Structure formats: structure tokens, C-alpha cells
Image (cartoon, rainbow, N blue to C red):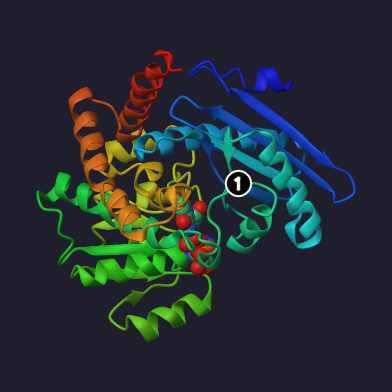
Amino acid sequence: MGVFASTDDPGSAGHEQVVFCQDRQSGLRAIIGIYSTALGPALGGTRFYPYASEAAALADVLDLSRGMAYKNALAGLDLGGGKAVIWGDPDQLKSESLLRAYGRFVQSLGGRYYTACDVGTFVADMDVIARETRYVTGRSVEHGGAGDSSVLTAWGVFQGMRAAAEHVWGTPSLRGRRVGVAGLGKVGRHLTGHLVDDGAEVVATDVDPRALAWARTNHPGVTLVDDTSALVAADIDVYAPCALGGALNDDTVPALRARVVAGAANNQLAHPGIEKQLADRGVLYAPDYVVNAGGVIQVADEIEGFNFDRAKLRATRIFDTTRQILRLADDEGVPPAVAADRLAERRMAEVGRLRAIHLR
Ligand code: NAI
């Protein structure tokens, strides 16, 4: 399928711009997708990944950049949605010259697109990219950056979970609730800390023994179970997927005992019909891209000159946004993910419209 046909999404205005970048010597092959700049410059990370084909890389960047437009809109940011992919194995291909070549292409867009970290790219890579472009965030603290975004991602997930708890049980407190955390990585660990502080009982799992050892040392009160299927089937009130995408699928949803799902993982719904299955089982799903926006809020703050307290305040508002979405979903009789999309589209239309007012 051609690029124009790929971006011709019937449910939207389509992508504004798709840029292919190549530097033969360093091996750079990148695609930058700008879905929307209705709210401001497009912000989204760079995924460095060995895609099976060019078509797969293109499909991913289009999907991810559209998702960022919605996430940034609901996070209340004055930023549009974009994303980039670098096609190749980062372990083999990543070099100073490749990253700097990429930085020059980002710079060439003149601020229409800001990049940041994603799968396969790290804070140190952003520091290298920043030697060629001003339009990069998520740099190291030493370079004036926001540093590790999992800190506010976890804080935002905790706020979204509190709003979902309030919706179901009438109180946002998680005291006495059993919360299942799948994935004790960067986000899962911070989230566990917030939950324990709030008086929740945490049940957790991870495939990495080092993550389990971390839990035993730092939170001996956390109950560890063998794997995600054991966690899902456990007697938990809240399920927090914090590992990989597709956590809510045809196997996990029928087994799920939790009343609430709120977690950090991106793309938790394995396919569109899953939402209905969750609703039919009386499970309240707090949309992933709403509750995990703390990370993008953290790196977006860097554009103004990073201030942790200001960024944390913005991430705290994920509580209000989640609450608004859950209420809207009830009022309009739609699943929360549909309500979230509607709210994002409304903000893009209402605020984006103001750009039609001419300014000298
Ligand atoms: P991470 O890589 O630090 O942690 C992931 C953890 O999940 C690891 O400890 C890993 O061993 C574990 N894991 C992998 N497969 C598993 C399985 N089958 N069962 C149980 N555990 C498993 O990643 P991080 O940064 O904590 O992110 C977690 C999720 O949140 C990812 O899906 C990520 O895309 C998403 N996310 C992260 C943000 C951030 O700022 N770090 C921002 C928004 C979303």
C-alpha cells in the first residue's frame, strides 16, 4: 500500500506529514510521522526497532503518531502528535553519526516535530541527538533534561487508578484494596511504592528474577506470584498491567477477577472487541493512554525548562481527566476508551480552531 493510502484513515483527517530520512553512510533509515499539529508542535518518541519490513515500520509510525496526538491532547498539553521510527537493530546500528544524522533531519522540520525516547532509545541518545537539534526532549538531567520519565508515568497511573477506584467504590483511596501489578520494571516499581504508601495490598509478578529480588528487599509485604495468569486469576480488586502491550486479551479477560484495570502498559487492549468483553464482565477499564500520560507530561515540561514540581502538578491532573472520562462514558453509554477519544477530538477541534484567528 502507498503512503497516501496508508494515511487515509476514514475516522480522521489523516496524517499531516510523513517524512522519510536516509543517510547511507551511517545506515540511518527513519520515518517521522506527524499526525496533527492542531494543538502545537507534534511530540512523540523515536522507536529504534528491527522491523520485518518497511511496510511494518511505516504502519507502526502511523499508528503511534496518531496515538500521541490523542494522548497529548488529553494530557492538556499544547502539543500535537507525532512519532518516529528508526528501522534497524539498535544493538548493531546505533552510532554517534547515525543519531546525529537523525538529529539533523529532526532539525530540518523547523520545530514541527519534537522527539524523545521510546523503545530502543534512551536519555543518553537524546543528549547526542540534541547536538544537532533543539527539538528534542527527554535529555539527561546533566543536560537540563527531565531525566527518567517513569517517575511521573507511575504517579499519573496512580492518579488514574484513584479516579477509577472512586468511580467504582465511591472513594479514591486504595487502602485495603488488593492491587495486582504485572511488571516490576521502572514504572511498576514506582507505582508499587505509591500503592504501599496509600495502604494498598500489592500482589505482583515479573519474568525477571532481579525485579522479584527488588520487591523482596524493598517491599517485603508485597505478595509475589508465579506469572501473569496467576496474577489475573488472583483475588485482586485492581489489575495494573505494567509490562507489555496486549495484556487484555481473550485469555486474560475471562479469567480476570479485578473490578478495575489501570496500568502503564501501552496498547493494553489486544483487539477492539476486548472492550466490550470487559464491560460485559463489569470491569472498569481506565484507558491506558490517559493514565500513562505522566511520562510525556514530564518530557514536555522540558521544552519550557524543566521544573519537576510543575510537571508533577500536571501529572496529578490525570485524576481529574480520568474522572471526567469515566463520567462521560456513563452519560453517553459508551466504553471509557471511546469517551476518551471523543474528549481528545473535542479538544483538538475546539482549541485547534483558534489557530484560524489571524495573528501578525
Ligand atoms: P521496563 O522495561 O522498565 O519494565 C517492564 C517490566 O516488565 C520488566 O521488569 C520486565 O521484566 C517485565 N515483564 C516483561 N514481560 C513480562 C511478563 N510477561 N510478565 C511479567 N512481567 C514482564 O518498562 P517501563 O518503563 O517500566 O514501562 C512499562 C510499560 O509502560 C511499557 O509497556 C511501556 O511502554 C509503558 N510506558 C512507559 C512509560 C515510561 O515513562 N517509562 C510511559 C508510558 C508508557
Q: In which quarter of the image is the N terminus?
A: top right
Indicate whether 342 appears above or below 243. Answer: above
Residue 157 visible in the current orientation:
no
Reading the image, the residue beneath label 1 is: 134
Q: Is residue 246 left or right of residue 84?
A: left
Q: Position of residue 30 (x, y in %)?
A: 74, 41
Foreground pick, 45 / 270: 45
Q: Is mark 1 on a helix, strand or loop?
A: loop
Identified at 74% across, 50% down, the residue is 50
Residue 352: quadrant of the picture: top left
Name of the residue lying farthest toward the left: 170
User: Mark 1 CB in 8 Å range of ligand 1?
Assistant: no
Q: Is residue 226 above or below residue 234?
A: below
- Residue 183 coordinates in the image, percent (x, y): 45, 64
95 and 333: which one is in front?
A: 95
Q: Looking at the image, is 234 positioned above or below residue 261?
A: below
| Badge count | 1
Q: Residue at x 32, y 28 (%)?
A: 343
Please tell me which residue is depicted at 64% across the width and 48% down the height of the picture: 47
Residue 250 visible to the viewer: yes
Q: Between 58 and 104, which is closer to the camera in this rendering?
A: 104
x, y (%) of residue 288?
A: 39, 45
Q: Residue furthest front?
A: 360
Judge from the rendering whether residue 305 lies leftward or rightward of residue 351; answer left or right.
right
Say left or right for 232 vs 134. Answer: left
Left or right, 53 with reference to 45:
right
Residue type at mark 1 is Arg
Q: Dot 1: few (<14), some (14–19), or many (≥20) neighbours within 10 Å?
A: some
* Residue 144, horizontal then vertical, whole percent: 51, 61
Q: Residue sitting at 22 percent across and 36 percent down?
A: 324
In the orientation shown, which residue stands out farthest toward the bottom?
217
